[in-house]
Image (cartoon, rainbow, N blue to C red):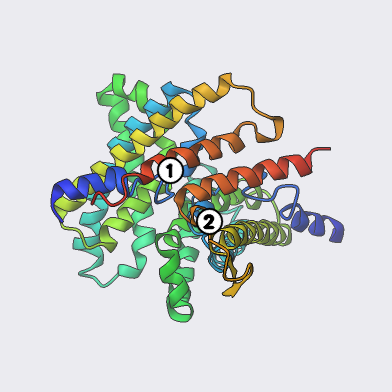
Amino acid sequence: MGYFELIVSCIFVNNILLAQFLGNCPFLGTSKKMETAVGMAMAVVFVLVLAGVITWVTYTFLLVPFDLVYLRTLAFILVIASLVQFVEMFLKKSIPALYAGLGIFLPLITTNCAVLGVCIINVDKEFTFMQTLVSSFAYAVGFGLALILFAGVRERILLARVPRPLQDTSIGLVAAGLLSLTFFAFRGMV
Amino acid sequence: MAKTLVQEFTKGLWAEIPPFRLVLGLCPTLGVTTSMKNGLGMGLATTFVLVFSNILVSLMRNLIPSKVRIACFIIIIATFVIVVELLMQAYAYALFQTLGVFIPLIVVNCIVLGRAEAFASKNGLLASTADGLGIGIGFSLSLAALGAVREIIGTGMFFGYSLFGPNYKPFTFMIQAPGAFVALGLMLCLMNLVGKK
C-alpha cells in the first residue's frame, strides 16, 4: 500500500472515530463547544504521533527481542502515560503559549482509547517505521476532522428544539450516526 | 450489612447501569455490538477485569500513596487485561479475533478506572466485589441488548435463527458503523422515557 492510499484510508475510509469507534468518550465529551473541540483535536495530533512512534520503537526493539510481546498492553499504556506527563512538563516549561492552549486536554489523553488503539493497530498490521509515522498522523488528522465537524453540528443542535427524552447525549449520538453515514461514502475509494 | 451488599450489587443493574446512566465506555459499546454474542463476550471480559481490579484495588487501598494512585490503578487493571487476553487466546480464540483491538482497550475503558477510583479505593473488599460484579453485569446486559437489537433488525437473524421468514430484507444499516450510533442514541432516548417519573 502506497503512502497516499494509507493517508486516505486512515483519514476517511477507516476514520478512527466514525468507522472504528475509538476515542468516543472525548468525541462526545468535548464536542459541545468549538473551542474545546479544536483544543482536543490539536492535543491528540500532537500526542498520537509521538505515542505511535515511541510505542513502535518500544515494541520492535524491546518487546520482540526479549520475547515479551504478551506484555504489550501494559508496556504501551505505561509508555503513553509517562509520555503525556513528560509532554505536559516540557510544554509548561518551554512553550507556555502552546501549553495554555492544550493544557487541560493533555491529562485526558492518557485514557483516550484512540491513542492506545492506534498504537496497537500499527504493530498488529506490522507497519514499518515510516508507515507508523504516516498512519499515526493521518489517524490523528481524521480524529480532529471528525471532532471539529461534529462540534459544528452540535452547536447548531443547541439552537434547535429537541424533544425532552432525546436531549443532550441521545440526539448527539443520532447526529454522530448521520455524520458517520456521510463518511461511509468514502468506502471503496481505497 | 447484607442489605447494603445487595444494594451495591443491584445499583449497577438499573440505577447506575453503564453505558446508559453513566455515559462511559462508549467505544466498546459501539464497536463490538454487531451481534448479541459479541456484545455479551465483550461484557463478560470487561466484568472479569472490573471485578478483579476492584478486589485488588480495595485490598491495596491503604498501601497505595494517593499521589500515584491513578498510575497504580492502571497497572493493576492492565495486569488483569493481559490475563483476559491470554485466557481468551487459549479458550475462545474466534471471539478474541472478532473483538480484536477492543480487548486490550479494556485497559482504557473509563468504567473500569472510574469504579477503581470512585468506589474500590474507598470501600472494603466485599462491597467492592459486589460493586464490580453489579456494574459489570449491567454493562454486559446493555451490550447484549444493543447487540440483539442491531442483530435482529440488521440481519433478521437471532443466534443464527431466521426470525422473519425468507422474504425479510435485512436493514443492513443497523449492523454497520452509522447504525451503532443511531441505535445507541435511540436506546438512550427510550431509557430516558422509561426512567422518567
Give residue B116's position: percent from left, percent from top.
Answer: 59, 51
Give residue A107's quadrant in the image.
top left
Label 1 is placed on what type of residue?
Answer: Leu
**Picture residue at 38% right of the left edge, 53% below the top:** A77
Kindly identify which residue carries mark 1.
Answer: A181
Q: Nearer the viewer, mark 1 or mark 2?
A: 2
Label 2 is placed on what type of residue?
Answer: Phe
**Within 10 Å of the Cα at label 2, are there few (<14), some (14-19), or many (20+) other Cα atoms?**
some
Horizontal relation, residue A49 to residue B132: left or right: left
Query: Farthest bottom residue?
Result: B91
**Picture residue at 64% right of the left edge, 69% below the top:** B163
Can residue A56 be seen here?
yes
User: Mark 1 to mark 2: distance in Å?
Assistant: 14 Å
Give residue A105's position: percent from left, percent from top.
Answer: 41, 32
Near-viewer residue (B116 or B21): B21
Q: Could you tell me which chain the residue with mark 2 belongs to? A: B
**Picture residue at 28% right of the left edge, 42% below the top:** A11
Above/below status of B87 relative to B79? below
Give residue B41's quadrant in the image.
bottom right
Q: Which disc is residue B164 wearing?
A: none
Q: Could you tell me which chain the residue with mark 1 belongs to? A: A
Horizontal relation, residue B56 to residue A118: left or right: right
